[in-house]
Amino acid sequence: FHPLKLPLPEDRVRRWHPHYLFAGATTNLSTMGAHVSVLSPGHSPHPPHAHREEEILVVLDGEAELVIALNDTGLNARCEQLGAGAFVYYPAFQFHTIRNATAKPITYLMFKWTGPPQETEAPFETTISRTEDIRQIGNAPFATQLMFEGPTHYLTKLQVHLTELQPDAGYATHADTHDVAIVVLSGSVETMGRRIERHGVVYFPAGEMHDMKNPGFATARYLVFEFHGSLSGEVTAWRSAARTRSLWRTLGNRTYRRVRQSLAATSLWHALRPIYWLLRRIFAALT
């Protein structure tokens, strides 16, 4: 549970101030972390860079300029303006950065994660969604609208939906097999006895009980991110097996996984993927 009251402190010297929320591992993901950052006017935290983590960036306040690049030079980069409530998904090894071209600070939330490679045939590319384009989902007590859904390099499925919850509406306590992150855009919600106001963030790892209701007098609107990981127990099995192996074997397997992760997210792999899947189908038919 991470209630956030904006504006958060700005660092006028570094001009970029991250506030770290959490970091760790879950049964679905090898690593998952989140931070909220305040970016000063006229500044960018770094040149275009790429990393093995997948990433979701949600603008909480202000207007951000995304730079989606082909390499670290930023030449011929695609630029997108994102207002409050909009978000972007970056696949692993996508070159990117963020800029503040406005006259006031912007605040944004970041989720970053890794997991066992899925070898997905057609994983998500960089995807932008704007909730401000959706005026109202409906008049039902509990209404949702799917923003996007599909596999990624580390997830069997990443699903994002926008939810509107009317006063006194909600759903009963339950547990999911996937991790769930909730970002409140407007109004307030209550989950497991804790009230979360606008801009608040809640993260429920797979298997953790949770409920939801609207304790206020206005419609609550929030984003739900579902992180569906590997086959049940795969991440845990990786960790358990590593504890019983010799040091050299553990290091060797870790290196193999990192190389496999890196290769599967490169432009070379994108070009070779159709051949790879054709060979897999041929091999499966022969065995």
Image (cartoon, rainbow, N blue to C red):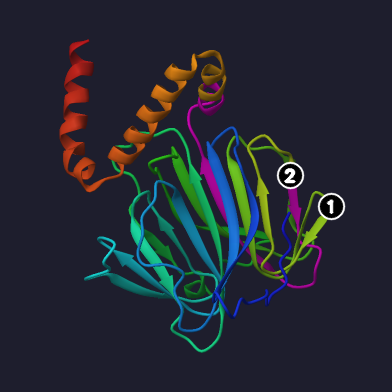
Left or right: where 259 falls relative to 55: left
Using a 10 Å C-alpha cutoff, classify the residue at mark 2 as few (fewer than 14 neighbours), some (14 to 19) or many (20 or more).
Answer: some
Span shown in magenta: 210-237
Find numbered disc 1 in the image and state the secondary structure of the residue it sits on.
Answer: loop
Q: How many marks?
A: 2
Label 1 sits on residue? 193
Image vertical order of residue 200 relative to residue 246, above or below: below
In this rendering, position of residue 106 left or right of residue 21:
left
Disc number placed over residue 287 in the picture, else none? none
What residue appears at the point 69 percent right and 75 percent down from the top-left corner? 6
Q: Is residue 151 above or below residue 138?
A: above
Can the viewer see residue 24? yes
Instruction: Based on the picture, tell me whether residue 175 belongs to the magenta stretch.
Output: no
**Closer-to-camera residue (18/217):** 18
Question: For the residue marked with disc 2, what is the amino acid?
Answer: His
In the picture of the structure, the residue carrying the numbered disc 2 is 210
Of 272 and 142, nearer the camera is 272
> Dot 2 lies on which element?
strand
On the image, the x and y values in percent for residue 167 come to: 77, 66
Residue at the spot x=84%, y=52% of the render?
193
* Most distant residue in the right direction: 193
Which amino acid lies under the numbered mark 1 shown in the image of this protein?
A: Gly
Outermost residue to the bottom: 103
Q: Residue at x 40, y 23 (%)?
A: 253
Q: State which quadrant residue 77 falls in.
A: bottom left
Q: Residues within 10 Å of mark 1 (few under 14, many from 20)?
A: few
